[in-house]
Image (tube, coloured by chain):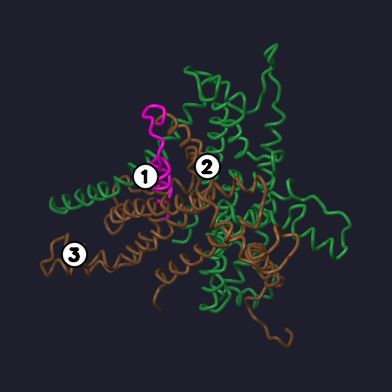
Chain colours: A brown, B green
Amino acid sequence: MASKGFVISRLPGFNPIAALVFAGLYLPIIILVIYSFNAGRSVSSWEGFSLQWYAVAWENDAVKDATIRSLYLAASAAVISTFLATLAALGTTRRKSFGGQTFIYVMINQPLMVPEIVSAVALLIFFAMIKQATGYAGMGYLIAAHSAFCIPFAYLPIRARLEGMDMTLETAAADLYASPWQAFRFVTLPLLLPGIIAGMMLAFVTSLDDVVITVFVKSAGQDTLPTYMLGQIRRQVTAEINAISTVLLALTILLLTLFFLLTRKKD
Amino acid sequence: MSPAEQAEVTRSARNGWLLSAPALVVLTLAAIGPLAIVVAYSFMPAGEYGNVAWGFSLEAWQGILFTKDIFDGTLAWADANLTIFWRSVKLSVLTTVFAFVVGFPTAWFIATRPPKARAMWLFLITIPFWTNLLIRTFAITEIIRKEGLLNTVLLKLQIISQPFEMIYTDTAVFIGMTYVYLPLMVLPLFASLDRFDMRLLEAAYDLYANPWQVLRRVIIPIVKPGIIAGSILVFVPSLGAYVTPRLLGGGKNMMIGNFIELQFGQGRNWPLGASLSVTLLIIVTGALLVYVRYANRETRHGQ
């Protein structure tokens, strides 16, 4: 081997491909962000730095409305799904395997397996029936749908955390005359908290990103930020969409960084 | 087992069910239950203004492959539908294969970094994975559309004299899907490669294997479960893709997902939309069962 020395794990051509992949993954996103600061209208020419598109988006009532709805929806879905997922994780870990446990796993992970378009169609039909029967056309449908498909995302980190936990701590608490509730409240829950927060963040991001199910389930005038963007992209595109995308991107990266800090294993 | 132990096991199982019950109820109402309605709808006749009429009909299932002549009622192959199915399968297979070809070296690159750097590279793959799919598709749109960056740059450099039309073609959809689903290939491949014992490489090279043989005969057989997992994770959402073909394929280059939507919109043929959805669901379930079976066999060998 040449002067570089022989690296056992090097395979010819692999590193350049990896470099291209990383460049290919990030270049479009970086360009999108750069052009959100463009003074001109489109990506065909750079006309100087400007924050005007952020101002345009900020003053656009439709955007403001969709943003508030998106955040409200994501927060509701994250809280509900995380609560349900925490209970389910406590029910399915750290006990002798019981009949039907596989069934519960499959049920919980089902939203990850069924194509989104199929779930969306199913919810459209089902909610149309309820709408007709009750006349209710509020946010409840979106909150219910989002809470359901966020459950697996909240469940996975919580379960991972529970499985890594030391069961003897609870036994110790019980030996010291803690009631089961006290043992849970003062021993298990504090240890589980990073997992719960991590799960809630994943659920929040998942809900915030959803397009397909939301498009099908929403009633008139219930645009979320992604469905608003979808509608705009199809009509005419201005750099306003770049500005909104950049803000969403920043929010996602922030939440993910927090998630990684929370779930990082201590070496 | 003593009666006391037996009671303890029963109690534990009951608590397990009780704690899982609220999540199961919500999933049944807002995720799984409605799927049953879709199945039922696929066996009903279409209503005049959308929705369905009560009754039993196999027309929606027939409508997947055949069209009925309005006048004499003869059946003919539904060419438009077949084109859409063929496009969906073709693009999904291409996306999966290409994602593997570029995703494997990427996962290998990450897995062979020192531990600290590995976490950083992995994080760089995870960010696009969690970034809004719509934003990522939009980013690709901005580059390849007619007045997009690619055309602008190529025109400026005088490589081309006319902007070329790439958007609203199958190629555009393929590029877009590879872009958005690539992290789904890299992550499971990395998970397999991360556990790969590098000493096997030493052994192989000691036995005069060349790099290609090492890859072909040592690495790939061992990380096969990861390859299958990654392929299914890419293939399944590709086949059901909706946003990417809608933005990059335009109205002409539909995939199954868009075709399903059409039946609930302008098409006003809910039963056909339902039968198409059930078909998609069956294909996806089939793919997942293959995976589960394969994964189980692998672990048994390992034990």
Residue A26 appears in view: no
Q: Is residue B238 magenta?
A: no
**Residue visible at 77% across and 60% down?**
B150
Instruction: State which region is magenta.
Output: A131-153
The residue to which callout 3 is attached is A183
Residue A1 appears in view: yes
Q: Chain of mark 1?
A: A
Counting residues from the N terminus, which is met first, the one under dot 3 or under dot 1? 1
In 3D space, how far apart are the residues under numbered discs 2 and 1 (Cα atoms)? Answer: 30 Å
CA neighbours of label 3 inside 10 A, class few (<14), some (14 to 19), many (20+): some
**Residue visible at 35% across and 43% down?**
B26
CA neighbours of label 1 inside 10 A, class few (<14), some (14 to 19), many (20+): few
Kindly report the secondary structure that dominates the magenta region of the rendered protein: helix
The residue to which callout 2 is attached is A215
Q: Are marks 2 and 1 in contact (CB under 8 Å)?
A: no
Say which quarter of the image contains residue A246: bottom right
Residue B243 numbered mark, or none: none
Say which quarter of the image contains residue A183: bottom left
In x, y percent, where is residue B46?
55, 21
Along the horizontal axis of the image, is B93 left or right of A120?
Answer: right
Q: Nearer the viewer, residue A132 or B246?
A: A132
Q: Is residue A149 magenta?
A: yes
Q: Are marks 2 and 1 on the same chain?
A: yes
The residue to which callout 1 is attached is A103
Along the horizontal axis of the image, is B251 left or right of B264?
Answer: right
Element at label 2 = helix
**Residue visible at 20% across and 48% down?**
B10
Q: Nearer the viewer, residue B1 or A175?
A: A175
Quadrant (top left, top right, bottom left, bottom right) of the N terminus of chain A: bottom right
In x, y percent, where is residue A207?
46, 52
